Image: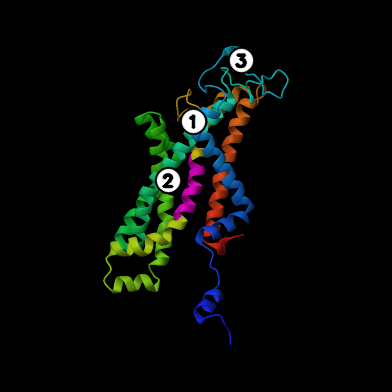
Amino acid sequence: MSSIPEAQRSVLSTPHVPSRFSRVLRNLLGNQGGLTGVFLVTLVFVCAIFAPWISPHDPTAGNILNRLDPPAWMAGGNPTFPLGTDPVGRDLLSRIIFGSRISLYIGLLSTLLSVIIGLPAGLLAGYFGGLVDDVIMRIADVFFAFPFILFAILVLALFGPGVNNLVLVLGISGWAGLARVVRSQVLVLKELDYVKAASTYGATPGGVILRHLLPNVWGIVLVVSTLNIGINILLTSALSFLGLGLDPIIPDWGGMIASGQLYMTTAWWVDAFPGIALMLTVLGFNLVGDWIRDVVDPTMSR
C-alpha cells in the first residue's frame, strides 16, 4: 500500500503546464529570424532613447572644414567621425542615431492612428454586414484606389511638411488595409457557435464585439501593425527623399540619403550608412512581425 496520500499523488502526477510567457520565450529562442528581428528593433529603440548620451557629436552642428570626411578606417578618415561626415560637415553617426528617434516616432504614432481608425471600422463592417459593411468598405476602396503619393502631396501641400502632418498622412492612408484584415477575421468568428450563442442569449452587439470578437482579432492586429511600422518608416524616408517630409536640418534617414545623392561616386558613405540603417530597421520589424504571426497562429509557420 502506498504511503503517499491520494491528494499528493494527484498533485505529483499533474503535468506541468508552461506559462504563456515561457512558451513565447521558447518560441523566440527557437526562431532565428525572430531573434534577429528582436535584436535589430531593440537596437533601434536603444539608439532612439539614449541618443543624446551615445551620439559623439551634435547632429545639427556642421563644420565646413570637415566636409565629406571619409569613415575613420579609410585613408584621410578622422577618428572623431567614425562613419564620416556629410556635405556640410555634420557627423553621420550622430545623425543616424538621432534619425532613429524621428523614424520610430512617426512609425509608431502613424500605425497607432491606423489602428484607432481601422480596428473599429473592421469590427463594425464584419459584424453588422449589409449597409454598414458596404459603406465602410467602399470608403476603404477609395483609399486603396487613390495613389498614396498624390494623397501625401495633397495633404502636405495644404498643411505643410512636418512630423505631425506626416503622422496624419501615413495614419489615414494605412487604416483601410487593417480594416479589411479585421473584417475578414470577424466574418469567420461571428459564425462560431459561442458567438451565435452569446447573441441568442441576449448579449448586445457591443457586448459581443467587445467580449468575443475583439480579443480574438488582437493577434492579427498586432502582426499587421508591426509590419506597418516598418512600412511607415520606409514611406517617411521616401517622402523626405522627395522633399515632402521634414525640414532638412532634422536628422532623418530619407533626407540624409537625398543630401548625398550628388556624391554617390565620390562620397558613397553619405548615402550608404543611412540606407543601411533604414534597411536594417525595416527588416527588423518585418522579422518581428513574422515571428508574432507564428506565435499567434502556429499553423502558418514555415
| Position of 241 relative to 200 (above/below) | above
The answer to which of marks 2 and 3 sits earlier in the sequence is: 3
Which amino acid type is marked by label 1? Ser
Circle nearer the viewer, 3 or 1: 3
Residues at circles 3 and 1 in contact by the CB criterion of under 8 Å: no
Tell which of 279 and 31 is nearer to you.
31
Residue tagged by mark 3? 66
Q: Point out the stretch of residues depicted in magenta.
A: 221-232
Circle nearer the viewer, 2 or 3: 3
x 55%, y 49%: residue:
288
Which amino acid type is marked by label 3? Asn
The answer to which of marks 2 and 1 sits earlier in the sequence is: 2
Residues at circles 2 and 3 in contact by the CB criterion of under 8 Å: no
Alpha-carbon span between mark 2 and mark 1: 18 Å
Q: Which residue of the protein is positioned furthest toward the right in this rendering?
A: 75
Residue 266 included in the magenta stretch of the image: no
Q: In which quadrant will I find the C terminus?
A: bottom right
Q: Is residue 87 left or right of residue 206?
A: right
Find residue 59 and report its horizontal and vertical position in percent: 52, 23
The answer to which of marks 3 and 1 sits earlier in the sequence is: 3
State the image quarter where residue 209 is shown: bottom left
Alpha-carbon span between mark 2 and mark 3: 41 Å
| Position of 183 relative to 3 (above/below) | above
Residue tagged by mark 2? 174
Which amino acid type is marked by label 2? Gly
Q: Secondary structure at mark 3?
A: helix
Dot 1 alpha-carbon crowd within 10 angstroms: few under 14, some 14 to 19, many 20 or more: many
State the image quarter where residue 271 is shown: top right
| Position of 167 relative to 22 (above/below) | above
Q: In which quadrant will I find the N terminus?
A: bottom right
